[in-house]
Structure formats: C-alpha cells, structure tokens
Image (cartoon, rainbow, N blue to C red):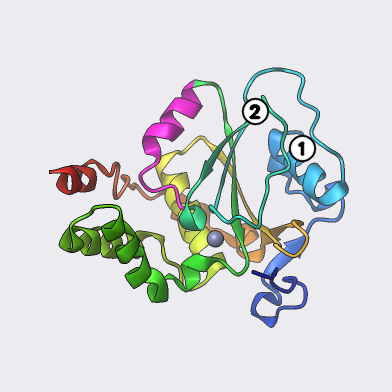
Amino acid sequence: MVLPKSVRQDGHYAGRLLSISSVEDIPEEWRETPIEALIRSENFGEPIQERSGKPQLLIATCVEFRYALPIPRMYAYVIRRASGRLIGSEFSIAYILSQGVRHLALIGHNDCGMTKVDGKLPDMIDALVEQGWNRDRAEDYIYAQAARHKMADELDGLRREYVRLKRVFKKLIIAPMFVDLADTRLFIPTWYAGIDPRELDSPDLPDHVSDIDLITSVSN
Ligand SMILES: [Zn+2]
C-alpha cells in the first residue's frame, strides 16, 4: 500500500488543520508537558530523552501500520485501536491514570481505513468464521462493533472522541492531534480552538464501559 498524499495537498483537509512549526504554535495548555515533547519529536526533529523512568503520557491512536510512534522505552503507555477510539478501553485508562499519567495524546490520521470499513465487513466476518466463530455471532459482533468504530470523516471522528473522553475523564489533559501519514508531522484540528467548554461539561457516562456482554455472548 502506498502512502497517501500529504494533508497539505489534499483538498479534503484544506482549512481544517493548523500546522505546528514552532513552540509558539503549541497551545499553552500543552506547553512544557509530555505532549510538547511528543510534538517536538515529530515536528522539530528533537528525539524524546526519557530519564525519569516513570510513565509520562498515554498515546492513543489507530492500529494503522503506516504510522510508527517516535517514542523511547519507559516513556508512554500506548493504546492502538481501529480508528483510535477508546470505547471499551476504560479499564486500561483507569490503570494508566493510577500510575500517575495525566496527559493523553489522541492522534487521528489521514486515509484511515475506518472511513471505508463498510466494504471490508464481509471479509472481516469471513476472517472470524475461519477462526472458528459461528457465522451468526460473527456477523452480530462485527456489525455492532463497526457502528462504534467507523467514521465518515477522520477529523469529525476525532472531535467526537475528544468530546466523549473529556466528559468521561474530566481532569485528563487531552491533546487531539492529526498525523500526516506522508511524513508523520503532527497538526492540530482547527475545531480544537472553537470547542465550547459547556459542551465538555455535559454529564456523560461511558456509553459502553466494557465489551463483557459481547465477549460473553461470543464465548457461550
Ligand atoms: Zn486508521
């Protein structure tokens, strides 16, 4: 699979991303945090030097194989899931919070397979059947999960997940960013500066705290 064209040349993203070319472009609330270190590594060519031996950051991004994270050992927890959505990972996040992490880099990317996953669902069902799943259960599982992971648009999907996570983890500092698969530079979605804090204040319980019900129904 070839790399997609840069978001700078793709009209789909025109006017929707802010570049980060200097420290001044980094939002104040991310400065001098582990988020700034990640940005400096990707955009300024300053590799992360981890000396504390303590986890600094949670990075959540897509399973995408064309993106490799620029991090050393002993620096960050990483959750990679299709689309980068963290629904169903609340247990993992609770553990990571308990280890002292207070910052989350939530990274979307261009050309995400989850924007076109509908056409892949039959193959995914076949893949589970080949692994021994009953076909009816495989179909139920894949269609239920597809509704939670697919996106019509990567930047809108990132916004939706940012708002959801801010409602569920109110004190976590979350940096929504977008990586250009063409050269792995990080951008900030223009919507970030326009978020109304009242939108984040809305009470919201996790809509799917766990996958236990699905796992149970599959294994029965
Ligand atoms: Zn993706």
Give the total number of marks visible in the rendering. 2
Q: Secondary structure at mark 2?
A: loop
Horizontal and vertical percent position of residue 47: 83, 37
Q: Quadrant of residue 139?
A: bottom left
Instruction: Tell me which label, 2 or 1, sits earlier in the chain.
Output: 1
Q: Position of residue 215 (x, y in %)?
A: 23, 44
**Which residue is tagged 2?**
56
* Separation of marks 2 and 1 at Cα, in angstroms: 10 Å
Give the amino acid at mark 1.
Ala
The vertical placement of 66 against 41, above or below, is below
Does 77 sit left or right of 70 as displayed? left
Q: Is residue 158 above or below residue 219?
A: below
- The residue shown at (34%, 47%) is 203
Q: Which residue is mark 1?
A: 37
User: Is residue 95 covered in magenta?
Assistant: yes
* Nearer the observer, 84 or 194: 84
Seen from the viewer's position, the closer of residues 150 and 65 is 65
Near-viewer residue (76 or 209): 76
Q: Is residue 215 left or right of residue 93?
A: left
Q: Residues within 10 Å of mark 1 (few under 14, many from 20)?
A: many
Q: Position of residue 209 (x, y in %)?
A: 30, 42
Q: Indicate yes or no whether the magenta region holds residue 76.
A: no
From where the camera sits, is residue 131 visible?
A: yes
Q: In terms of image quadrants, where is residue 72?
A: top right
Q: Secondary structure at mark 1?
A: helix
Query: Is the stretch drawn in magenta largely helix, strand or loop?
Result: helix
Residue at (68% x, 48% y) in the render: 68
Quarter of the picture containing the N terminus is bottom right
Which contiguous range is marked in magenta? 85-98
Q: Tell me if the residue at label 2 has its CB under 8 Å from ligand 1.
A: no
Q: Residue 24: horizontal and vertical position, in percent?
A: 84, 49
